[in-house]
Image (cartoon, helix red, strand yellow):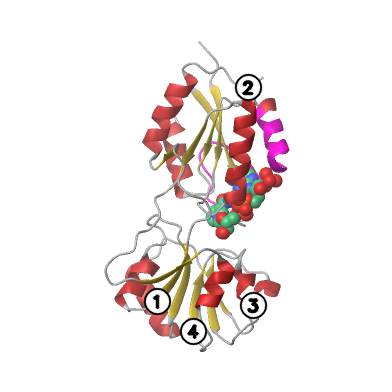
Amino acid sequence: MRAPFPILILGGTTEAMQLAALLKDSSKFAPVMSLAGRTAQPRLPEMAHRSGGFGGVDGLKRYLRENAVAAVVDATHPFAARMSGNAARACADLNVPLAVLTRPAWERCDGDRWIEVDDFAAARDALGTAPRTVLLTIGRQEVGAFRGGVGHRYVVRSVDAVAPELLPDGARVIAARGPFDEDQEIALMQREGIDAVVSKNAGGGATYAKIAAARRLALPVIMIRRPRSASDGEMHDAAAVMRWLEACCGDHAGTS
Ligand code: NAP
């Protein structure tokens, strides 16, 4: 019997965990999930995993070679553009098959008051000059883009603590991890007197309640578009990736 095919899953998302659940009992594949290592208490998969950067494209290529990786699944967050770009380059250079597993972007619905922008600086500018109370739900890494400028009051929600030097003056920080429920989100927005929400277009169900809550309260949402566009090989469900793995490992023996 052939040794299992080493598979690298670039994780950190619900979709990566769904794929991990499907691969858990497979004897054909030997998957390893890679996490960025930024979250203090990450959800860990029931499979081999590693944590922390590879050291750019060259580091990733070294990892793929040393571990004879037969296929890579990029199941990173839709905003993890650098990691995705590195994976695309490394896999192309080494001729390792690559699949992208991502969740569809959220679509605007009737009643939504979205202002769509391309990046975090544009989101800050879109808040305008009249002071507002803003719910900032963009994770913690890019909070610094909202420092300085006009005197909005920010309520910053993040899984992990935000570095004090990134916080806008007077920001209130709420540490919480989704999934959140729509009624709780409405209660939070009303309690804090929120009059605008800033969000990345992350997609998926875990954090959508804030978008539905903003719609019910008729609040504007500054929606930051995804940094990468959908690619041809993009898949939206873990079962499709399993079929892809079966197909591409049928005739691929790994890197050398
Ligand atoms: P990024 O900017 O694409 O990645 C920066 C570097 O982090 C990569 O070049 C890589 O370092 C390392 N890295 C990222 N994901 C990795 C993984 N799965 N395994 C190993 N190394 C990884 O991504 P980011 O800095 O993590 O986040 C960018 C945006 O995505 C933020 O808005 C963040 O909130 C959001 N996000 C990311 C994750 C995630 O798991 N990455 C989860 C939720 C949200 P090397 O170049 O050294 O290999």
Q: CA distance from mark 4 to mark 3?
A: 14 Å
**Range of magenta residues:** 40-64
Query: Where 194 sits versus 122, above or below?
Result: below
Q: Are marks 4 and 3 in contact (CB under 8 Å)?
A: no
Query: Where 217 sits versus 18, above or below?
Result: below
Mark 2 burial class by Cα count in 10 Å: few <14, some 14-19, many 20+ = some
Q: Are marks 3 and 2 in contact (CB under 8 Å)?
A: no
Q: Which numbered disc, 3 or 2, marks the residue that appears first in the sequence?
A: 3
Q: Which numbered disc, 4 or 2, marks the residue that appears first in the sequence?
A: 4
For residue 31, say whether it is visible.
yes
Q: Which mark is residue 133?
A: 4
Say which residue appears at 60% left-offset and 39% top-offset. Answer: 87
Which of the 4 quarters of the picture holds residue 89? top right
Q: Which numbered disc, 4 or 3, marks the residue that appears first in the sequence?
A: 4
Q: CA distance from mark 2 to mark 1?
A: 49 Å
Identify the amino acid type marked 1.
Pro
Residue 76 locus on image (x, y percent): 53, 47
Q: CA distance from mark 4 to mark 2?
A: 53 Å
Identify the amino acid type marked 3.
Arg
Identify the amino acid type marked 2.
Thr
Residue 141 locus on image (x, y percent): 62, 63
Say which residue appears at 64% left-offset and 27% top-offset. Answer: 94
Q: Is residue 155 magenta?
A: no
Farthest-out residue, left:
110
Residue 57 locus on image (x, y percent): 69, 39
On the image, numbered disc 2 is attached to which residue? 255
On the image, numbered disc 3 is attached to which residue? 147
Which of the 4 quarters of the picture holds residue 191? bottom left
On the image, numbered disc 1 is attached to which residue? 220
